[in-house]
Image (spheres, rainbow, N blue to C red):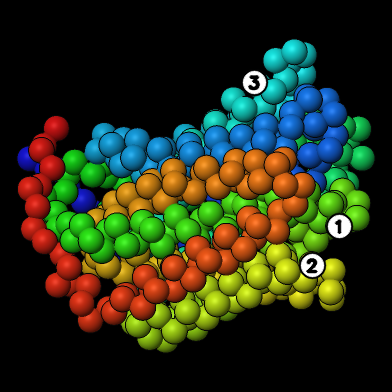
Amino acid sequence: MSQHIPPHTPENTPSSFSLVIICLLIGVNLRPALAAIGPVVTQLQQDTGLSFSGVAWLTLLPVLAMGIGCFITLWLRRYISLPRLIHGALVLLLLANLLRLMDAGSLNAAALLFTALLSGSGIAVIQTTLPIVIKSATHDSARVMGFYVSAIMAGAALAAGLTPYLAQWLAGWRSALAFWALPAMIAAVAWARWSSRHTMSFSSPLATQTSVQRLHRSRLLSLIATFSMAAAGYVCVLAWLPPFLMDLGYSSTQSGLLLGYLTAVEVIAGLLFPAWAAGSKDRRRVLFSVLLLSVFGFIWLAAFPQATSVLLPLTLLGLGIGGQFPMVMIVTMDHHPDARQAGSLIGKVQGYGYSLAAVTPLMMGNVRDQLGSFSAAWLALAVMYGVALLLCSRYNPGRYLQLLTPAEPPRPV
């Protein structure tokens, strides 16, 4: 017999305000483990001896874990409730950041890679499960998703902008990286209290569900390709923009602040574009806009990095990348009317997408090692986003229900 799921009532349904606040507290923890590396990369390389290709693994591993972890999370959802999964993931993030305080001597590089793997695993669980909470708890999921993704970008902005100063104030890059365990601890405590007050339908394991509809394979592959290309641009900018700016003559502190500026623009874009898209079920106009902005930004970085102020291409990229991430997630979730199945769909899309995108920072690091420049990599990303534009032209919401096919329900446990 399936587990009883309590109906939505004023007592167990969260207010929109409390839902946004908890999404902000959690979202801000999903990028510091990645974004804090770039601004202190010079000191880190001096202490660990890592090359640019080696440093790329500090981005590759968590992004790869974010991909593979999505599939593991989909399996865990059959046995563990979402509140417990999210709480456990926040604890993982806390530990990953805190362990970076440790000096492992000759094993420093291996220890850093281990923390990268831990952080990616925690991020994967949250990115697979929190969208389900959002879609289950509100009818205005596009706007709340915008706040959630903006919080992710804000976390990256804070990490990029503050980490160089933290390294000075706390006497070292290790303490600066470990500092980001603090917001993870706050989020873990806040989530434990919030989730205990709202026993909604998302609290039960997935094994209680009785009906399943799957998205047609060709559309699933299209969404995976779109997400992977969007994610590739995001993680490459996160990993390599500070070293690129240092190649242009900026200091590590200035590079960190400029990455912070770009991610601050991403925060604004993450609020504006989902709000624009909320006015129509057809999100393609917004998708085209954000992808075109990214294309122009990458071309500008590759061809004219010193022709004008670097703030111009960074603004274009901030608007494009900041808007595309929530928009691709929203469009993916639009493909299924059921919150749990939409969550499973976005888990698969992120799983494959992040796994494919994970190799791009390593490839970009190799380009830098071999050619002494990032220009060719920026151009490659511009071409990739052009392909994503073609895929997005097919996302007509009038056909979404036609793309769903019946499938066997999951076996009871």
* Residue 409 image offset from top left, x and y in percent: 10, 47
Quarter of the image for the C terminus: give it: top left
Q: Against 373, is 188 above or below?
A: above
| Left or right: 411, with 330 as reference point | left
Q: Where is residue 70, by image quadrant?
A: top left
Q: Residue at x 40, y 68 (%)?
A: 330
Mark-to-mark CA distance, 3 and 2: 35 Å
- For mark 3, give the secondary structure: helix
Which residue occupies the foreground of this view, 64 or 191? 64
Quarter of the image for the N terminus: give it: top left
Mark 1 is on which residue type? Leu
Q: Where is residue 375, by image quadrant?
A: bottom right
Which residue of the protein is positioned furthest toward the top in this rendering?
106
Which residue corresponds to mark 3?
A: 110
* Residue 299 image offset from top left, x and y in percent: 66, 70
Mark 3 is on which residue type? Ala
- For mark 2, give the secondary structure: loop
Mark-to-mark CA distance, 2 and 1: 8 Å
Which sits earlier in the primary sequence, circle 1 or circle 3? Answer: 3
Question: Which mark is drawn over residue 285?
Answer: none
* Residue 10 image offset from top left, x and y in percent: 35, 65
- For mark 1, give the secondary structure: loop
How busy is the neighbourhood of tag 2: few (under 14 within 10 Å), some, or many (20 plus)? some
Q: Residue at x 67, y 32 (%)?
A: 54
Q: Against 317, is 169 above or below?
A: above
Q: Residue at x 77, y 47 (%)?
A: 372
Is the residue under label 1 in contact with that under label 2 (CB below 8 Å)? yes
Is the residue under label 2 in contact with that under label 3 (CB below 8 Å)? no
Which residue corresponds to mark 2?
A: 305
Q: Nearer the viewer, mark 1 or mark 3?
A: 1
**Do we see residue 25 in this rendering?**
no
